[in-house]
Image: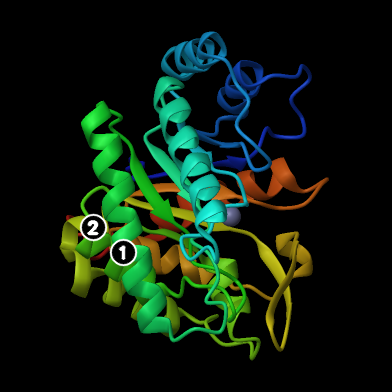
Amino acid sequence: MEISESLRFGTVGSPQTTSTSGTPAAIEHIRQLGLDHLEIAWVQSVRVSDETCALIKAASEKHKVSLSIHAPYYINLNSLTSELMEKSDERLLTAARKGYLAGAYDIVFHPGSYHSQPPEQVYERAKEKLLEITGILREEGVAVTLRPETMGKSAMFGNLDEVVQLSKEVPGIAPCIDWAHLHARTGDGTFNSYEEFADALTRVRNVLGEEGLHRLHFHMSGIAYGTKGEKEHLPLNEADIRYRDLLQAFIDFGVAGTCAIEAPMPFHTSDALTMQATYRRLMNLKPSTDNPDE
Ligand SMILES: [Zn+2]
């Protein structure tokens, strides 16, 4: 049976098996591995020249590897002072501008903290902020999608419904669903069954429509968690996350987009390959609609 490649798999950050440094080499290595996507981890700061961005873009086009950017961690749509807010804005704008030059379509970022404020109030502030930022980028012709990520701690702004609702209300925003974070967020081991994964995808479809399921971006890994949520990423084979059930839900819902794997060393590359191989295997096991008896 022919495989319909609706999900592209890759790593967050260069695969650890890349022999030379630099993002263009990592892109070439992603292709050698048979993966299709790289999320460039500009997580501390964005210090990349326009010339380097051009090299990254050329490598992406040559090797047909799609790119996303993980923007710096120090972004908070709910910053407590105007000075911090300004710096946060600048980090997100810079990641988007440079990412666009580098040929990335999607800019992933951590949306921020509740700072113990009412979630509805934080949501409204985040929405206003994103309307402002996407407006600036649109005016500049920076055609990227900003993707707030679902967060792994209950004190952090960014549960599934918040991220999906922002995507509906703000043009230029779409979700980055981190499934490990959703599993870890409540600390009680929930969000780890086919039913719960299917329920999450149903919620996405209810708000963003069928086409919302066709342009998703995911983070995935094993994860350790406690009562307050996420502790650390784990390799798939040391974690309880039921990734086969998740992949089956992707297939059953016709999900398309990109999935970036964040496993710790030395499982970084191998977990991305395992996710991709498992997805392809499940696709092949899926009964064909043309031959229902097969
Ligand atoms: Zn992240």
Q: Which residue is found at the position 77% from the left and 34% from the top?
A: 16
SS label for mark 2: loop
Residue 100 horizontal side relative to residue 234, left or right: left
In the picture, the quarter occupied by the C terminus is bottom left
Image quadrant of ligand 1? bottom right
Closer mark to the observer between disc 2 and disc 1: 1
Q: Is residue 144 left or right of residue 237?
A: left
In the picture of the structure, the residue carrying the numbered disc 2 is 170
10 Å crowding of disc 2: few (<14), some (14-19), many (20+) = some
Residue topped by disc 1: 127
The residue at 65%/17% (across/down) is 25
Residue drawn at (55%, 43%), measured in percent from left and top? 70
Image position, residue 66 (x, y; %): 43, 30
Q: Nearer the viewer, residue 214 or 95?
A: 95
State which quadrant residue 188 falls in.
Answer: bottom right
Q: Earlier in the sequence, mark 2 or mark 1?
A: 1
Residue 168 position in % (x across, y down): 21, 63
List x then y, in percent, for residue 194. 45, 79
Percent coordinates x, y for residue 231 in the rendering: 76, 72
Residue in the picture at 33% in, 36% down: 144
Describe residue 202's horizontal placement relative to residue 93 as left or right: left
Q: Secondary structure at mark 1?
A: helix
The answer to whether marks 2 and 1 mark residues whose Cβ atoms lie closer than 8 Å is: yes
Q: Residue furthest right?
A: 266
The kind of residue on which mark 1 rests is: Lys
Q: Quadrant of residue 197?
A: bottom left
Q: CA distance from mark 2 to mark 1?
A: 7 Å
**Residue sitting nearer the eye, 186 or 245:** 186
Image quadrant holding the N terminus, namely top left
- Decide: is 244 above or below 218: below
* Residue 121 is at least partly visible in this image: yes
